[in-house]
Image (tube, grey):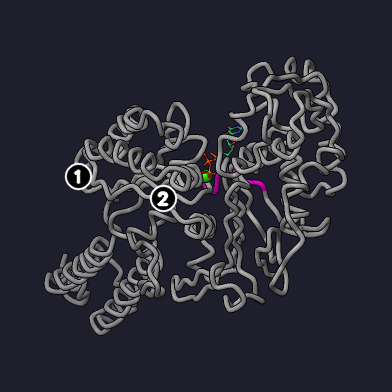
Amino acid sequence: MSAQREMKEKNPWHMPVTIIITVIGVIAIVALVTVAVLQNRPLPQKYKYGIVLDAGSSHTALYIYEWPAEKDNNTGRAEQKHSCKVKGPGISSYASAPLKAGESLRACMQEAEQWVPERRHRETPLYLGATAGMRLLNMENSTASDGVFRAVEGALQKAPFSFQGARILSGQEEGAFGWVTVNYLDDRLKQGLETTGALDLGGASTQISFISDKFDGSESQSNSVAFRLYGNDYNLYTHSFLCYGKDQALRLTLAHQTQSGPNLISDPCFNPGYSSTKNYSAIYDSPCVSNRKPQGAPLSFIQEGKGNFLQCQEVVKNVFNFTHCKYSQCSFNGVFQPLLQGPFGAFSAYYFVMNFLNLTDTTIPLETVKQKLASYCATPWSQIMQQHPDVKVKYLAEYCFSGTYILTLLTEGYNFTSESYSDIKFIKKIKGSDAGWTLGYMLNLTNMIPAEAPDSPPLPHAGYVSIVTIMAILLLILFIISLRPLWPRCSKQPQIV
Ligand SMILES: Nc1nc2c(ncn2[C@@H]2O[C@H](COP(=O)(O)OP(=O)(O)OP(=O)(O)O)[C@@H](O)[C@H]2O)c(=O)[nH]1
Ligand SMILES: [Ca+2]
């Protein structure tokens, strides 16, 4: 018994003071680590929303974007949460019944109310941007286009969101914001990486936008857009060709083929066996072709498909004018274009058409792509209809023309070659968000892309936690070592007999 007491007296770990100090030390270090880690833990995410209506020439689409509320101009990326396709044609088609343009938006606006949490409704900005269809209507009849805007504004003001206005985008804006969207979604802007050019093919206009080392904006200022984004300067080349969207381009080729006013045209851009009666006025009812309507033309004509790709390509080439260029180099119609510099993302109708034709793989040589398209064009119309009973007949009938137009625009118009063709990627979405001008437009209007690179914490959260933990463990070891004088001696244990 006395030996045990003697051992206890010699072993300071059995002294209450030492035990209390050790316990307090351990508790203090655990508390320090816990507070440091919890204090800096990322907060539970809250989201903000933005809504953009893309009032295109052929249809209107609504896009809802979402981004983390705490990080809107820092590390969080805005993403598409939902999209809604408005039923019916584009708003420019409602020139004679403008109220219907407003009504047509109702179903998608109601969907938006469901998708955006109610407590965020009032602060969510809502924009409507109109493109080439309204540009053409405004040129043709500005009173009618004002009427359409009044009607859609009336409808959008009724929504519970913060309506920021409806306007026509310039072709430059449309091209530039498409480029911003593609590069933002690919995280190329923040990281200052090489950028991707943007090719957008709509119904009434088409845009090409890219950065070229050879372009500083001096040769054609109207094609230049300067940006400073995340601390990098960009001098973007962009051009929008009004009337060169695929629906207006079809009118241009039909206008070319009906110049002599026949009532039967044998059209190489439609499948053999296809036949349709079309009204002259329907073709020429657009400022893109209205001045070419032949005098004394009959009311209608019959269009019969011939299905010949090479001849179709010749007809399509006629819509491009290569005769004059006052710059060092041009694409077509006397428009300046610097040397192409890839890669490129091609979206909207580029994607719809090439995807239908199974031609989105650009590693296939251009010659093979042309052969495949030639074979599609030569396929009888009855067989095409049989193979695709679910595809809208209007779309189905036009794929031979549209495919030929796309290849001709890219190669003859923009000067892509057999080599540079593989720089193009036909895309619909990037990381779940549709490629198009709407996201870039919203990012710009909400100032979500800062001109300068944002300051970021020197360490990510995981790195911070690791360092705090390692330091705490080191402190604990130091603390234990500092108690060394109080450690028990390594003397022989007394024998208890
Ligand atoms: N095949 C096919 N064509 C489509 C589809 N959606 C739209 N299109 C057609 O593709 C063309 C371009 O469509 P969009 O990109 O929506 O054009 P838009 O925005 O209305 O027209 P712009 O104002 O000129 O930009 C039009 O001729 C449409 O009719 C689709 O799902 N499949
Ligand atoms: Ca469009």
| Relative horizontal placement of residue 169, taking residue 321 as reference (left or right) | left
Residue 83 position by quadrant? top left
Query: Within the magenta stretch, is there residue 128?
Result: no
**Disc ID at residue 482:** none
Q: CA distance from mark 1 to mark 2?
A: 24 Å
Where does the magenta region start and end?
A: 426-431
Q: Residue at x 51, y 46 (%)?
A: 132
**How far from the left and from the top, in percent, is residue 2?**
15, 69
Mark 1 nearby-residue class (10 Å; few <14, some 14–19, many ≥20)? few
**Between 140 and 236, the one nearer to me in the picture:** 140
Asked if residue 216 is positioned above or below residue 266 in the image, the reply reads below
**How far from the left and from the top, in percent, is residue 133?**
49, 42
Q: Amino acid at mark 2?
A: Ile
Secondary structure, mark 2, is strand
Q: Give the labeled residue for mark 1.
A: 122
* Foreground: disc 1 or disc 2: 2
Quadrant of the image for the C terminus? bottom left
Is there any visible trace of residue 47 in the rendered image? no
Q: Residue at x 52, y 35 (%)?
A: 58
**Between 486 and 234, the one nearer to me in the picture:** 234
**How far from the left and from the top, in percent, is residue 346?**
63, 50
Residue 304 position by quadrant? top right
Q: Amino acid at mark 1?
A: Arg
Asked if residue 181 is positioned above or below residue 140 in the image, the reply reads below
Quadrant of the image for the N terminus? bottom left
**How far from the left and from the top, in percent, is residue 416?**
76, 58
Q: Which residue reaches farthest left?
A: 17
Q: Residue at x 74, y 37 (%)?
A: 259
Q: Give the labeled residue for mark 2.
A: 168
